[in-house]
Amino acid sequence: MHIGHNHDDIDHESLALRHYGEGIYQESLGNLAEALNEYMMANVLDPKLVVVQNKLDSLREKLCL
């Protein structure tokens, strides 16, 4: 999914949440590498989002990273 080309993505927090949501979607489809990519992007955009950090930790365990 390409994120970041509409007026809702003005601030980095909103954009981070959209990447987080896309990560959840990709994880539900079983696309774990893509989910990891989305969670990492969300974490870079807003490193204070604890839910993203928790998802990253959980997914790293699933992927044995």
Image (tube, helix red, strand yellow):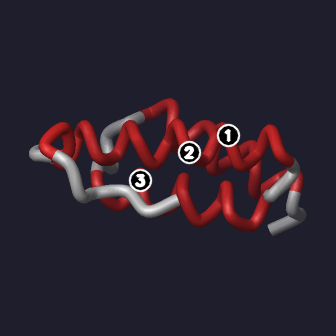
The residue that label 1 is drawn on is: 25
Task: Work out which quarter of the rendered image holds the C terminus and state it.
Answer: bottom right
Q: Amino acid at mark 1?
A: Tyr
Name the residue located 76 percent from the left edge and 50 percent from the top edge.
59
Real-space Cα separation, disc 3 to disc 2, in angstroms: 13 Å
Nearest to the eye among marks 3 and 2: give it.
2
Q: Residue furthest front?
A: 6
Dot 1: element: helix
Which is more toward the observer, 1 or 52? 1
Judge from the rendering whether residue 36 lies leftward or rightward of residue 18; answer left or right: right
The residue that label 2 is drawn on is: 22
Name the residue located 68 percent from the left edge and 48 percent from the top edge.
57
**Disc nearer the start of the sequence (3/2):** 2
Q: Amino acid at mark 3?
A: Asn
Real-space Cα separation, disc 2 to disc 1, in angstroms: 5 Å
Dot 3: element: helix
**Disc nearer the start of the sequence (1/3):** 1
Dot 2: element: helix
Real-space Cα separation, disc 1 to disc 3, in angstroms: 16 Å
Tell me the crowding category of disc 1: few under 14, some 14 to 19, or many 20 or more residues within 10 angstroms, Cα based: some
Tell me the crowding category of disc 3: few under 14, some 14 to 19, or many 20 or more residues within 10 angstroms, Cα based: many
Q: Amino acid at mark 2?
A: Glu
Name the residue located 76 percent from the left edge and 45 percent from the top edge.
27
Instruction: Establish if 3 lies above or below 16.
Output: below
The residue that label 3 is drawn on is: 43
Which is more toward the observer, 1 or 22? 1
